[in-house]
Image: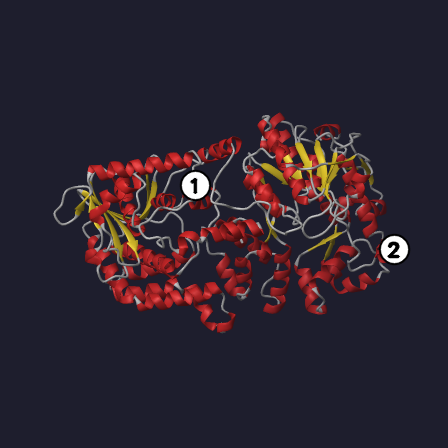
Amino acid sequence: MIDILLKYNDSKYVIVVDDAIYSNFIKLKSEYELTHHHLFKFKLMSHKELLTKLSFSYENHLILDIYAKTNEPISIIKEKLKFLSYVDDTHALKEFIHPFINQLHYHHDFIEKNKDSLFIFLSQPIYLKKLLDKHQLKYEVILESNKYIPKVYQFDTMEEEIFYLFESISHKLESGISPDSIYIAGINDKNERVINKLALSYGISIDMAKDLQLWNFKYTQNLIKLSIEELIKKIVEPTENQIEQRINELIVQILNRYPLHKYDEETTKKIIVSDIKEAKLRKDRITNVIHAIKFEEVQMLNEDALIYVIHANYSYFPNIKKDNEFLSNEEKLQIGYPTSHEENLYHEKLFTYLLQTKRIEYVSFSLKDIYQEYVPSDIIKQFNNIEPRKISKEILTHKFSLNTYKSFFKSTNEDKLLTTFNNDFKLNASELNILKQYIQSLDLKLSPSQIITYLKSPYIFYIQNILKISNFDVNIPIFMGDFFHKLVETALIICYFEKINQRSSKNDLDKRIDDLIIEFEAKEFDENIFFDDFFDVYFEDKRYIFEKEINNLTLDEILIIQAEFFIQKNKKLMIQSLSEIILRSNSANKVYVETDIESINLKGRLDLLIENDESFEIIDFKSSDQSTLKYEKIEELLCNLINENPIDKSDLQIIQLIAYAYLGLKRYNKDIFVEFFAFLSEKTSKNIRLTLNQDDEIFSISEKIIKNYEQIVNNVYYKIMNAEFPNRTLETKKRDELIEKDLNVYKALAYYTQYNTESEDEDIDE
């Protein structure tokens, strides 16, 4: 491509680039100019920009003017304006624009100045040919000479096609090829889910470079429900949520196109919604990853690029253009606009040309997926070199590809998975080695709860923390715990602003709480008034739920109603607990809320850390009373765990406190007190409290206890690093002590395996 730029480096040339690669072309041109300290003399334009110069341009509010007068759908108005560039004065479309003719801006100066220029096109100017001829402008189409015949692979199923792709990419990466040099064309809605899943299994990162539809964000749709005045007020407010900030900026750009007060709200809203539905949120390109591209972008890639083309099936490679526009094909012929057949022929020729470059590693297609059957594109059939390919378990050697492969394919006779689960976790030497390498690459630090999970069932730990299959579900105690955490944090900021650590990032709730903090700073703090005001602020964005009919409530909305009820029911106990926390923080030097602490292979998040002159208090909030825990038998419990003797499973909870004491000992050079604080119990004075020093009233953690706990942590860590995940449960003194919540992770595993559920990240992003 650089050769072309150098060849036409003269002011008489105007290089015109397809809209799909225009930004890539500018980047290539700019990088060369910066590197070689040399500015190109030619002019550069996109097809769309040249089309405007050869016809007319208009201000965006023209669409509003036409809509206000004709009440035609905005999409039809935009199509009429598109075709208007091609019609002569006798065409009916001229009558449509006649009342607004003064709002069209013709660019006669541009045409006159370029009478002697030569327009250079990198692809056929099918949308510009008539206008170029009409204005008698000179142009050439240049195409590099490509005679390479690409390899074409056929697969029975789309899943096999994607497995083969990742195996090939894995081999390339192992050979030293940079991921930034590898590109995949052909990712679409049909195969994206499978690609995302296999990317996780193979440990390969792919930048989808997928522009996101602005309209698909719930935040955008909520904005549109506001009045224009409320909308403007909302989007000009700064926010630390980067996605929302970018959405705000895009909507500001859209609003700036129109005179907002010239038309009624309904008319203005329609054009704004129309533009928002066409707008996209552009994702920034990232590096050191495989890149997904549109196939048209192939011509802009460097010579060292390695390109895979997948899903080369008929109607997808390229997409078939259909005759569904305002003008029929016959009418398009009359005005000189390309028909849908001519557009399809153009793309076929362009794709055929682009395929014949040595940068293509191979082209592939499949004959079916779980929804439908496919045939190969006419473009690749013309090469007459289609080679059937098969995937077998023997060639799947990378990361967790084999296990993932087994989960994809079912027995057609029995309609069940080919893999089943039994009481063993047995891997062959090769599989075990791969799993060990993967685990050791995770830089794993274990939390106290993860230690307990492994002790109860190593296989459940494996499912949750290595496979990342979660059975986590929000319930009322968790919801109430979140509420109390935020209640305490807010109260401590109000009472002891100089002492408490501040949040580094803020969401919408935090902003509402900030306003509450400012309000309370100016008056005497009253726990009862504060609780009521905080409750209102915390659930402010949930008030809409109470306007819905009960039959229309979602499960999440029902949970919120239940949580509000139980919070109000336990209001007295929460205020009592809050008062005690405030009192105990009064003499502190520093107070930390939800702070992280870690050692070599252990980590923890402390609910509350109070730093005094000579000691640290580590407090872990619990919703229920913990005073029945047998802290006198801690040493016996740890010895039983080391020797794998039966225990009371309920006693395991006390290990969490030992973990915090251990972490505090490693981190701080002061006396350490650790405590379970039951915020929904009247027995706060009987909470479990441990110390590392001797005390007549508080149970002291001996050096032996610390060493025994350290031995347990090291044993668990060693077994995890060596992929020891036997499918067994901790031996307890009571056979029924493993309750349902300990075992329902198997349900999550079965669901994941049966339905190939997508990753949680996608649900969160959505």
User: In the image, residue 333 lies at what x, y percent?
Assistant: 86, 54
Q: Do the residues bearing badges 2 and 1 touch, measured as CB atoms within 8 Å? A: no
Position of the C terminus, as image quadrant, is bottom right
Assess disc 2: are there few (<14), some (14-19) or many (≥20) residues with their C-alpha within 10 Å of its C-alpha: few
Foreground of the two, 666 or 424: 424
Assess disc 1: are there few (<14), some (14-19) or many (≥20) residues with their C-alpha within 10 Å of its C-alpha: some
User: At numbered mark 1, what does the secondary structure look like: helix, strand or loop?
Assistant: loop
Q: Which residue is mark 1?
A: 726
Image vertical order of residue 250 relative to residue 119, above or below? below
Q: Within the image, what quadrant is residue 572 found in?
A: bottom left
Foreground of the two, 235 or 162: 162
**Amino acid on which the number 1 mark rests in the picture:** Pro
Q: Which residue is mark 2?
A: 334
Q: Between tags 2 and 1, which lies in front?
A: 1
Q: Within the image, what quadrant is residue 307 found in?
A: top right
What colouring does the structure picture have?
secondary structure
